Image: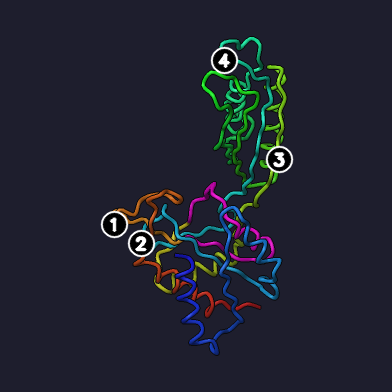
Amino acid sequence: AHTAMLLGAAKIIAQHVDELPNKVRLVFQPAEEGGNGALKMIEGGALENVNAIFGIHVWRNLPSGVIGIRDGPLMAGVGKFDVKIIGKGGHGALPHETIDPMPIAAQAILAFQTIISRNLSPLESGVVSVGVIKGGNAFNIISGEVEMSGTYRFFNEETKELIEKRINEVLKGVTSAYGASYELKVEEIGPPTVNDPKMVELVKTIAKRMGLNVVEAKKTMGAEDFAFYLQKVPGAFIFLGTKNEAKGIVYPHHHPKFDVDEEILHLGTALEVGLAFEIQLE
């Protein structure tokens, strides 16, 4: 959908290139999902001599055709953690001869949930979720190790540091209590997506002038590597609603039945063209 919208904009812009008030660069970026393709684009010079940047993302949480935008933080920063809990394996009939990493991992997962509910201010936002846990390969054997991986989300550096600190402290405390040990790898994948207030107002003005329905988007704990562009130059990330209950287009992003309302994609193209032709940069 994103590529289709920008290809449409490229065709229109190419037909009127002499009328542009500014030079325009169209970015077709690969590897957003986990690959941080934006960093590679920046390293390759995509932002050289660029004074503003805009992106549009189809968004299932908004009604089809509605434009959602807000200034300041829009999407969360994201990190990943990988954990190995090291105990002592043995036979399932003789648990007293082992240090079972399974209940230790279970205790850690439960304790992770208190990082947000008991360590973070209720006025702040954060997420800690364990998505993978694996250990053992036989029903009657206590494994010597358990591995798990998860994600954490944040809107500011203080929350990020708190989450990372508490994940380590939880693991240290739980494994120590049971006589086990652990290994932890924490990786920050990307920063929060923070829109420039001035650029947001420009988008709103142009979108409304075009007759588009513009609403204030809600912040989301989802993440987007467009954030790297916004760290370098002012700009805005924009949502285009695609939810259409009449067509059964209601499933969330990354769901196997996720779909977009193709009849509204031209609105994204129109907004991209409008931004190219109507924004006057100093």
Query: Which callout, 2 or 4, points at the residue further toward the start of the chain?
Result: 4
Q: Is residue 252 above or below residue 147?
A: below
Residue shown at 60% from the left, 69% from the top: 53
Q: Which mark is residue 261?
A: 2
Q: CA distance from mark 2 to mark 3?
A: 39 Å
Disc 2 + disc 4, Cβ < 8 Å: no
Q: CA distance from mark 2 to mark 4?
A: 53 Å
Tag 1 secondary structure: helix
Q: Residue furthest left?
A: 246
The amino acid at mark 2 is: Asp
> Dividing the image into 4 quarters, which one contains the N terminus?
bottom left
The reply, left or right, for residue 118 in relation to residue 242 is right
Disc 3 to disc 1: CB gap under 8 Å? no
Residue 92 circle label: 4
Q: CA distance from mark 1 to mark 2?
A: 8 Å
State the residue in front, 159 or 101: 101
Q: Amino acid at mark 1?
A: Lys
Q: Which residue is mark 1?
A: 247
Q: Is residue 167 magenta?
A: no
On the rendered structure, is 21 left or right of 165? left
Q: The disc labelled 4 sits on which kind of residue? A: Gly
Contact (CB < 8 A) between labels 1 and 2?
A: yes
Give the label, 1 or 4, closer to the camera.
Answer: 4
In-front residue for pair 136/5:
136
Expressed as whole percent of the image width and height from the top left, the position of residue 84 reads 67, 31
**Quadrant in which the C terminus is drawn:** bottom right
How far apart are the two marked residues, 3 and 1, measured between alpha carbons?
A: 43 Å
Residue stretch rendered in magenta on the structure: 217-239
Residue 249, image quadrant: bottom left
What residue does disc 3 label? 161
The amino acid beneath tag 3 is Glu
What element does badge 3 sit on? helix
